[in-house]
Amino acid sequence: MFRPRLSLPGWAALFTAVILVALLALLFFYSPDRGLRVEATAQPNQAAATPDTTVAPEDLPFDIEDIRSHLLDRPSTGSHTIDSQTTEALLYCDECISLGTALEIDGTPFQVALVTEPGTDTVFSAAVIGEQDGEPSLQLVVSGHDLTLTPGRGGTLVKQEKRYAPADEVCCPSGWSVQVYRFHDGRFEAGQRVSSAGEH
């Protein structure tokens, strides 16, 4: 049976092709992939995405003015205090308070009041209002930069806020943090906070 033989130039071409394929394979496996980059982004926590029970607006026991008055009447000391920036916004800015998404835990409704910086939509403070003897009762107050406070699963509230990385300008925070508050033994307890890398 006839078997073709490769000439010396043919062997050289074959050897060169094998070396080239091997080099390409090494380059493919060991070079960094610049086509895919994974970055931490401030995505809503899964707990915030699928809340158990929210309350329809018409079923809420208190309106904005009830809540504003209750927050302004709070003493300056105690377990839940309102800071001076929030107090000033409540006193002098009618449109700086709004109602967020309310939730219900074990049949008890809780309303979320959001306080914004005057002239902006940026929320810097949020209060959770329950009911005691037919009157508003402050259960939790949180603050932060451009924050949200939304109902989560299993009787939780999820706080998200923007945070500053070391190189950020004042206008533009690039970091974020998420913290879950769970209702336990009649009060909201803070859980572990998860933050993006590099924030302070």
Image (cartoon, grey):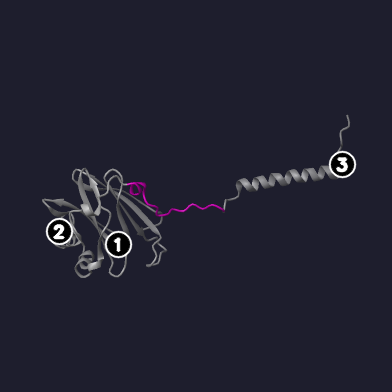
What residue is at 40 percent from the left and 67 percent from the top?
A: 169
What residue is at 21 percent from the left and 49 percent from the top?
A: 109
Q: Residue 38 — which label?
A: none
User: Of marks 2 and 3, which one's residue comes earlier in the chain?
Assistant: 3
Q: Residue 7 — which label?
A: 3
Instruction: Tell me if mark 2 has few (under 14), some (14-19) or many (20+) residues whose alpha carbon lies within 10 angstroms of its own.
Output: few
Query: What amino acid is found at the position of numbered circle 2 in the picture?
Result: Thr
The secondary structure that dominates the magenta segment is loop
CA–CA distance in space, label 1 to label 3:
79 Å
Q: Residue furthest top?
A: 1
Which quadrant does the N terminus fall into?
A: top right
Residue sitting nearer the eye, 200 or 127: 127
Horizontal side, residue 49 vs residue 29: left or right: left
Q: Quadrant of residue 70?
A: bottom left
Q: Residue furthest left?
A: 133
**Please, what secondary structure does the residue beneath circle 3 have?**
loop
Q: Residue 77 — which label?
A: 2
Q: Which residues are magenta?
A: 35-50
User: Of marks 2 and 1, which one's residue comes earlier in the chain?
Assistant: 2
What residue is at 30 percent from the left and 45 percent from the top?
A: 153
Q: Which residue is mark 1?
A: 123
Position of residue 92 measured from the top left corner of the image (x, y, whole percent): 21, 70
Q: Residue furthest front?
A: 58
